[in-house]
Image (cartoon, helix red, strand yellow):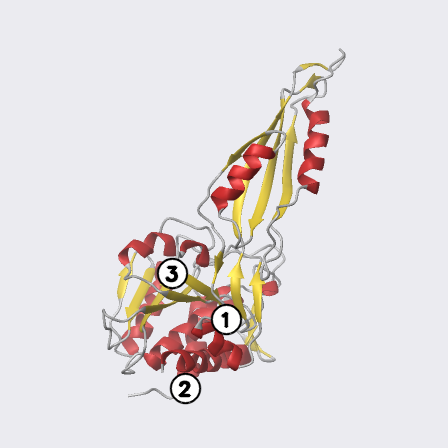
Amino acid sequence: MKIDQEKLTEKAIELLQKLISIQSFSGEEHQTAEAIENWFKTFDIPFDRENNNVIAKNKYWDDTKPTLLLNSHHDTVLPNQAYTRDPYDPQIIDGKLYGLGSNDAGGALVSLIATFTHFYASQDLSHNLLIAATAEEENAGPNSLRGLLPSLPKIDVAIVGEPTLMNLAIAEKGLVVFDAVVKGTPSHAAHPNDDNSIYKAIKVLDWFKNYRFEKVSEALGEVKLTVTQINAGSQHNVVPAHTDLVIDVRVNDHYSNKEIADILKAEAPCELQERSLRLNSSSIDINHPLVQSGIKLGRGTYGSPTLSDQAALTCQSMKLGPGDSTRSHSADEYIYVNEIEEGIDIYIKLLKGFLQ
């Protein structure tokens, strides 16, 4: 039996208010996981829980069919000091639902949960539906979607719920962070020294500033390389032995993170060491039926510069959800109630065009 969409939307907004009222920093999401469990209990939907991740399958699951994953997260960052409102008080004022995690990514999460519930008892779908309300997205923790994936069935395509104004983020940049060392000769500042690591770092900084990767993505543009930290020296009269840099590299879908690391380590005029290669770029073919279903609804497509749990997936995936990414991690975070209403409506229409 299909559940009325208007009623589902009302319950989804109530769930988001409940989630906002509960502190759920990364690694501390046990109470929000319980609130999500209560949703599934209310609608008589069997579910599983692994750590603070809550997972459910559609009623007529068929192992011979491909699987569509619906995923978003229920952890939050810490509220910043510029808040003027109680971050855990989910008030609706002038159509805005305020509260920590309302926009990132509570609105997307409850909209996907409502959408899954709408389709839960549908028969003859082209794909299985799997929903995962996951933890530790904000800190890429071990009990996030990445840690959950080995326990899940094979996933063929995914929608990751993040605030995109309900436009289709069909590609997402990956990330590699490098630690760089510019070496020199230590000495007393009073003596001549032609091998000062700080002065040598000037040329290195200039090299990073002007370096360009050859392949440019239609969706994501160039690989973006940015020096974000520099550190050297311990006291005024000592020339340091080395100057340390941190380089943030946002990777487009034409390179793997390993390729980026290999290129930079071979060409950079200093020693480089990557911290991790696991946060690769993500994408979905613009001709994929899921994308085409969204385009038929008038939704735009774009490439996203920000990371999400898409980085954990190896299947084709897109990022899509109500809310605006520019509000994420901001003071007095909010989402418009009508964005959630629109989000659920578009999600349902998108999946109808894809699954039926």
- Picture quadrant of residue 312: bottom left
Left or right relative to 212: residue 315: left
Residue 321 — which label? Answer: 1
The amino acid beneath tag 1 is Gly
Element type where label 3 sits in the image: strand
Left or right relative to 5: residue 223: right
Q: Earlier in the sequence, mark 2 or mark 1?
A: 2
The amino acid beneath tag 3 is Thr
Q: Quadrant of the C terminus?
A: bottom left
Q: Quadrant of the N terminus?
A: bottom left
Q: Which residue is denoted by mark 3 in the rendering?
A: 134
Left or right relative to 110: residue 219: right
Residue 28 — which label? Answer: none
How far is disc 1 from disc 3 in space, using C-alphas? 16 Å
In x, y percent, where is residue 349? 45, 82
Q: Is residue 349 above or below residue 267?
A: below
- Picture quadrant of residue 186: top right
* Of the pair 37 and 31, the residue shown nearer to us: 37
Q: Residue at the spot x=58%, y=45% of the render?
A: 249
* Of the pair 229 and 346, the residue shown nearer to us: 346
In x, y percent, where is residue 10? 43, 83
Residue 5 — which label? Answer: 2
In x, y percent, where is residue 109? 43, 69
Q: Earlier in the sequence, mark 1 or mark 3?
A: 3
Q: Is residue 270 above or below residue 90?
A: above
Residue extending furthest top? 191
